[in-house]
Image (cartoon, coloured by chain):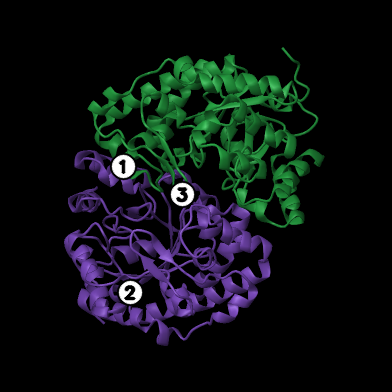
Chain colours: A purple, B green
Amino acid sequence: MTTLRNDLLLRTLRGEQTERTPVWMMRQAGRYLPDYMKLKEKYSFFERCQKPELAAEITIQPVEQVGVDAAIIFSDILVVPQAMGMEVQMVEGKGPLLPDPIKHIRDLDKLRIPDVHETLGYVFDALSLTKKTLDGRVPLIGFAGAPWTLLCYMVQGKGSKTFDEAKAFCYTQPETAHKLLQMITDTTIAYLKGQAAAGADVVQIFDSWGGLLGPEDFEVLSLQYIRQIVAALKDEVLTIIFAKGAWSSLDSMAATGAHGLGIDWCIRPGMARQLAGSDVTLQGNFDPAKLLSPIPVLKKEVRTMLDAFKGGRHIANLGHGILPNVPVDHARAFVETVKEYK
Amino acid sequence: MTTLRNDLLLRTLRGEQTERTPVWMMRQAGRYLPDYMKLKEKYSFFERCQKPELAAEITIQPVEQVGVDAAIIFSDILVVPQAMGMEVQMVEGKGPLLPDPIKHIRDLDKLRIPDVHETLGYVFDALSLTKKTLDGRVPLIGFAGAPWTLLCYMVQGKGSKTFDEAKAFCYTQPETAHKLLQMITDTTIAYLKGQAAAGADVVQIFDSWGGLLGPEDFEVLSLQYIRQIVAALKDEVLTIIFAKGAWSSLDSMAATGAHGLGIDWCIRPGMARQLAGSDVTLQGNFDPAKLLSPIPVLKKEVRTMLDAFKGGRHIANLGHGILPNVPVDHARAFVETVKEYK
């Protein structure tokens, strides 16, 4: 295996001292990059995910063009419901659509816990190819959606501000909901193990809709499944949990043994550290909209954020995905400010 | 003046001991009520707001049909931008549209700080008529949007998950943004004073998008203006601030001297009390989606919430507006469970 020349991210996740804070950006391989947009015009969303050469090219773009300290594989959390047997469409300008959502226990018959090598082998191929092409420049991050977030889409059938149908499903048919969550969990464990075997140095679990749940529901509907995933993986690969908005469960997320926890900009770094304790790396938490500020303002705000995290284990990142309307030089200014910070 | 026969809400806001917890629901006058839907079919949104008889009828429906301890005037936060000179359309199924949003300092020339009696007199008329028709049954709540939330719509021109254009406007043109926020603040103070004079016993300031801001931005872009409003009003009328998701500023919101603070279901009541201190009434925080649970589950969850607030000043409410797909008997079960609770 090629030796990593930049392993800042991995050492920070392991709790080792590093010469500076590592930096990457959620959705860094994406729509704010003109070179990505060119590929988007030529290939459909699933072509971009499923052709390893395209996925690898897109994954490496921000490493070369923005200078981030890690690559995150270009893919989507909804490849898992797809592999489990659901139809998933990506409707331009509208987001995902699952035309045949889960509504009753009988709908589970349409689902399977798939052989991930058969159904998601293309992700593993993309990871292997990316790893080879990166040639030790930076670590490679794999990812999956948290079971709760995937249930949201599988039941609601599309994006939502409240995911009230998904919640109502859990409240009115709890046994079916838990059966579904366990099926997703089992699939995700196999999927993330496959990603680690294919070359992912770190895996991040995205619970995009964890913050829609109160703390008790978050434990029952989300965290108990994330806990299984982390337990199954943490001796094989470094793990990060990002449950946007679920700040009030930072303590129990830290107790899973995950190496890193993502936080958004609505919580002060000091408060997050207090809740999470000192034995976990915090990742975040720049407001993505602040990348639209004039560069001098942006740089000052990044330094303020770094000051607030100082002294603890920290990976600089945004508090949510980068917005499509961010100019590339602003993204670069974010990364450079972190790299220059003393 | 008619004596109030049920003043539980007012006494709780003043910090007095009451025989039980008062209860109302945000958006209680609205789409889950079949009688409201009948009026919605016959009259446009602005007709329903602007005709005092209609607004009063809609406002009183949940008092009679669901048994809440307060009426909240049927209106919309966007009547203020409208009174300031902006066109506001309500597009069925899509939400508000402001076709000519604020983008530059010169756009402020199109706005005015209006004479609220001239432009918003219909709201005052609706309040007076409602007050008279209520005849002392329950207190009457007036409301307005927080300046930051109104800026979001006035700049972005429509709803948004991130309001990134509104934020970018504030980051790139801070002077213009503050000029606009001050214009909205001045209008809102006059508007809420008018509401109090017309019969509102309480006014609530809705900062629906306060939770999109990090704590420092919340202070600069939102709270400093809310503080002006509360200071101008709190000796004339009881005040409640509801800044959804802005939990990390509960301490500074409490310091404004507002009588009540709304909280959502993502914060534990104990934590909210710890942050807000003991000298303010907390209002909330039932997850609106939980009203879709089977009634026995719902009732149990309501009691769990009430247990968690026990011993402190509390108004039972949802953590956000009631969802349109909630059956009326579930809404009634929510209210009844609070009333029966010992």
Q: Is residue A265 left or right of residue B232?
A: left
> Mark 1: few, some, or many residues within 10 Å (few <14, many ≥20)?
some
**Residue at the image position 59 percent from the left and 16 percent from the top:** B198
Residue type at mark 2 is Phe
Front-most of residues B311 and A5: B311
Would you say the residues marked 3 and 1 are in contact, meaning their CB atoms lie under 8 Å apart? no
- The chain holding disc 1 is B
> Mark 2: few, some, or many residues within 10 Å (few <14, many ≥20)?
some
Name above or below for residue A206 compared with residue A244: below
Q: Position of residue B282 (x, y in %)?
A: 63, 34
Q: Position of residue B6 (x, y in %)?
A: 76, 25
**Residue at the image position 75 percent from the left and 52 percent from the top:** B300
Judge depth for marks 3 and 1 and give the one in front.
Answer: 1
**Residue at the image position 53 percent from the left and 74 percent from the top:** A184
Residue B165: image tag? 1
Q: Which residue is mark 2?
A: A46
- Secondary element at image label 1: helix
Do circles 3 and 1 both sit on a common chain? no
Report if residue A5 is visible in the image.
no
Q: In whole angstroms, how far apart are the C-alphas of marks 3 and 1?
A: 31 Å
Q: What is the quadrant of the N terminus of chain A in the image?
A: bottom left
Q: Which residue is mark 3?
A: A273
Name above or below for residue A131 compared with residue A268: below
Residue type at mark 3 is Arg
Residue type at mark 1 is Glu
Name above or below for residue A197 compared with residue A256: below
Do circles 2 and 1 both sit on a common chain? no
